[in-house]
Image (tube, rainbow, N blue to C red):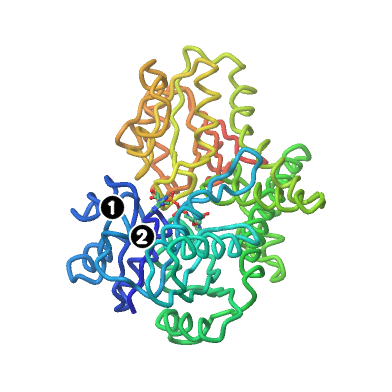
Amino acid sequence: MKLTIIGTGYVGLVTGACFAEMGNTVTCVDIDEKKIDGLKKGVLPIYEPGLESVVINNYKNGRLQFCTSLEDSAAESGIYFIAVGTPPGEDGSADLRYVLAVAREIGRHINDYTIVVDKSTVPVGTADKVNAAIRDELTRRGVKIAYDVVSNPEFLKEGAALEDFMRPDRVIIGTNSEQVRKVMRDLYLPFMRNHERLLFMGVRDAEMSKYAGNAMLATKISFMNEIANLCERMGVDIENVRQGIGSDSRIGYSFIYPGAGYGGSCFPKDVKALVRMALDHDFEPKVLNAVEQRNDIQKHVLFEKISKRFGAKLRGLTFGLWGLAFKPGTDDMREAPSVILLKELINAGAIIKAYDPVAMAAARRELPNEWFKSGQLKLVDEQYSALDGTDAMVLVTEWKPFRHPDFKLIKKIMKTPVIFDGRNQYDPALLREAGFEYSGIGR
Ligand SMILES: NC(=O)c1ccc[n+]([C@@H]2O[C@H](COP(=O)([O-])OP(=O)(O)OC[C@H]3O[C@@H](n4cnc5c(N)ncnc54)[C@H](O)[C@@H]3O)[C@@H](O)[C@H]2O)c1
C-alpha cells in the first residue's frame, strides 16, 4: 500500500518505519526541514532502540521517503496518517491547531478516495472537526471527493516503541465504515501473525480509549506514590508492599513503582486534556484531579528530602544526578521530573553534575542556558564522573547501567556518601551496611 504519514516525531517516524518494514511504500512528511534533511542523511531526530537501522535500511531500499510538504511527496497515497503533536492549550485542552492544519492540507491535496487516519491523541469529537476541515477545503476547490476519517490511536511506549508497534497488544480502529475496516485490517494484519488483535469500535469510542488508557496508567502511578508517602510516615517498607499487592493477579506488577512522578509528552497532557473534556461536559473528574495533584506534589519529593538533609540553602554543595530523560530508553525530556528537581536545586544555590546515557544532547538543547552559563549545571560524559567530589548522589531515571553500580568506587569518590534513590533501585540495608546514608521514595 502507499501511505503518507504527516508528522515525523516519535509516533510518525516509528509508524512510517514499521509500515515500510512490512513492505508498504511510505512517505513521511514534516514541516521541520532540519529533521527531514537529517533523516535523508541517516541522522535520526530521536533516540529509540532499534529504530535507526529500520529507518536507514528502508530509506536506502526506497520504501521510506522523507519530504517537507504534501506537495513534494512523490505519489499520492490512499491513506494519510495524521501524527502531529497535540500539546496542552492554556486551559489544559489538547491544542488541535496542528491536526486541523494538516486536515486542511489533506483537503487541498487529495484527488481520489482517501482514508484519513487520526493517529495523534485527540479529544472525543476531533474526527468530526477533521472531517469538516477537509470538507471545507474540498468545497473551496469545488470538487467532490469521497473520504473517510478514522481514529487509530497509538499506544507505543517511548523506549520500546519499535517493539510495541511491531507486536502491539491491540490496534484500535474507530470507524463505522465496512470498507475502511477491510483496508485497515489488511494494513495491520502483518503485525499480528499469530493472532488478531484488532479492535473495531466507533470513532468516539476509539478517541476516548486512548485517554482512558493513559489516565488509568497515570492513576496507578499516583496511587502508588500516595501509598509510598504514607508508608514512609508509618515505618512501612513500600517495596515489600509493592510486591505484596503486585502478586495479586487482579492488580499485577506493572506500573506500580513509586517514583518522582510521571512525566513525558503523554501522561501529563493527556490527563489534563481528559479533565478538560470532563469539565466541558459539566462533570467534575474527582479521581483525575487527584491523580494530577498527587503527581504535581510527587515531583518535589526528592528536593524535599534533600533540603531536609542539607537545609533549604544549598550553596557550596554539589550533587551528582544520574538520569535526565523522563524514563529509561528515551532521550525525551518533556515534563521530566529531573527538570523540576534541577530547577529547585539551582534556585537553592547548588551545583549539579549530571549524566544520562542518551539524553545529554536533548538536555543541552532544552534546559535553560543560564543554568550552564552560571556554572551551576555541568553535564559530564561518564556516570561516575558525575559523582566525583559530590555531597550526595540523586538517582532520577532508572537506566540499566545505574542499577548495579560499583558502590565501592562511589563511596571512594564522593565527598559524603549520601544517596537519594528516586526510583527505589537499591537495597537500603546493603547500602547502609556499606556506610551510605540512604533515602528512597517512601522509605
Ligand atoms: N510520544 C509518544 O510516546 C506518543 C505515544 C502515543 C501517542 N502519542 C501522540 O501522538 C502525537 C504525536 O506525538 P509525538 O510524540 O510523535 O510528537 P512530536 O512532537 O515528537 O512530533 C510531532 C511532529 O509533527 C510535526 N508537525 C507539526 N505540524 C506539522 C504539519 N503541519 N505538517 C507536518 N508535520 C508537522 C512537528 O514538526 C514534529 O516533528 C501526539 O498527539 C501524542 O500525544 C505520542
- Does ligand 1 reach within 8 Å of label 1's beta carbon? no
* Quarter in which the C terminus is drawn: top right
Looking at this view, is 51 or 379 the one in front?
51
Given the image, on which type of amino acid does mark 2 rest?
A: Leu
The answer to which image quadrant residue 356 occupies is top left
Q: Residue visible at 30% across and 73% down?
A: 21
Looking at this view, is 285 or 261 the one in front?
285
Whether 12 is drawn above or below 368: the answer is: below
Given the image, on which type of amino acid does mark 1 rest?
A: Leu
Residue 364 percent across, percent down from the top left: 35, 32
Q: Quick one: SS at disc 2?
A: helix
* Quarter in which the N terminus is drawn: bottom left
Residue 413 percent across, percent down from the top left: 37, 27
Which residue does the numbered mark 2 point to in the structure image? 13
Q: Residues within 10 Å of mark 1 (few under 14, many from 20)?
A: some
Q: Position of 235 compared to 15: left or right?
A: right
- Name the disc covering residue 314, or none: none
The residues tagged by marks 2 and 1 sit, at their Cα atoms, a distance apart of: 9 Å
- Name the disc covering residue 44, or none: 1
